[in-house]
Image: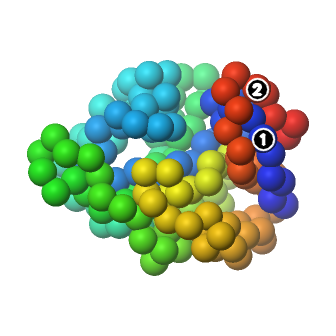
Amino acid sequence: MIKEVEGDILLTGAQAIAHGVASMDHFDRGLALALRKDYPSMAKDFRHYCHLENPPMGDAWIWSGVGGVRIINLITQEPAKQLNGHPGEATLPSVNHALRELVKMVKKENIQSLALPKLATGYGNLDWEKVKPLIYERLEALDIPVYLYSLYVKDKKAAE
C-alpha cells in the first residue's frame, strides 16, 4: 500500500528510509546531507562499502544503526566525474533497477514499513511524472505501508 504524504521524511515512523545516491557519494546535498548529519557513521560506512564493492548504478545498500534505524541507499545517480565533484544525474533505468533491488531487500530484511522521497528528482534531475509511475509499479505490490513523501515540509510530521 502506497500512501502519498507531505512532511519531513526525517520524522517518519517507518522502519526504513530509502533515498537515491551515487556510488562514492559525499552526502553533501539535500536529503543525503540531512541523513549524514543525523547518522555520520552511515555515510562513512557507505563510502567504505563503495571502495570495496564499486557498486553499479541500480544497486542498493542497507545500513542499520543504533535503535533499529535503517537507511537504504539506492544508487540511482552517476558517480562524480572528479574526486570531490558532485554526483551526476540519475537515469530512469537505474531508478527502475534500484526499485527492484529495494523490493528484494524489503522482503529479505523483513522491513515492515518504508518511507521514500520523490526519488531522483532533486539532484538526480529526473522528471517526477516519469519516476512516480515506476515507484507505483515496483512498490505497490509490497504488503507493507510505503510512505511516499511527495512534498517536503521541514519539521512537519506527516500523517502516515
Check the image and report above or below for 100 versus 26: below
Residue at the spot of label 2: 156
Check the image and report above or below for 57 versus 119: below
Q: Is residue 45 left or right of residue 126?
A: left
Q: Tell me where residue 135 sits by quadrant.
A: bottom right
Q: Are marks 1 and 2 in contact (CB under 8 Å)?
A: yes
Residue 66, given in percent of the width and then of the height, sits at: 53, 23
Q: Look at 85% across and 40% down and name the residue there.
A: 160
Q: CA distance from mark 1 to mark 2?
A: 8 Å
Amino acid at circle 2: Lys
User: Nearest the camera: 41 or 2?
Assistant: 2
Task: Say which element carries label 1.
Answer: strand
Q: How is the image coloured?
A: rainbow
- Residue 121 makes an appearance in the image: yes
Amino acid at circle 1: Glu
Check the image and report above or below for 26 versus 110: above
Residue 33, given in percent of the width and then of the height, sits at: 43, 31
Q: Is residue 148 left or right of residue 49?
A: right
The quarter of the rendered structure image containing the N terminus is bottom right
Q: N-terminal of the two: label 1 or label 2?
A: 1
Q: Look at 78% across and 41% down and name the residue there.
A: 6
User: Nearest the camera: 82 or 36?
Assistant: 82
Q: Look at 41% across and 64% down and name the residue there.
A: 90
Q: Look at 67% across and 27% down and name the residue there.
A: 154
Residue at the spot of label 1: 6
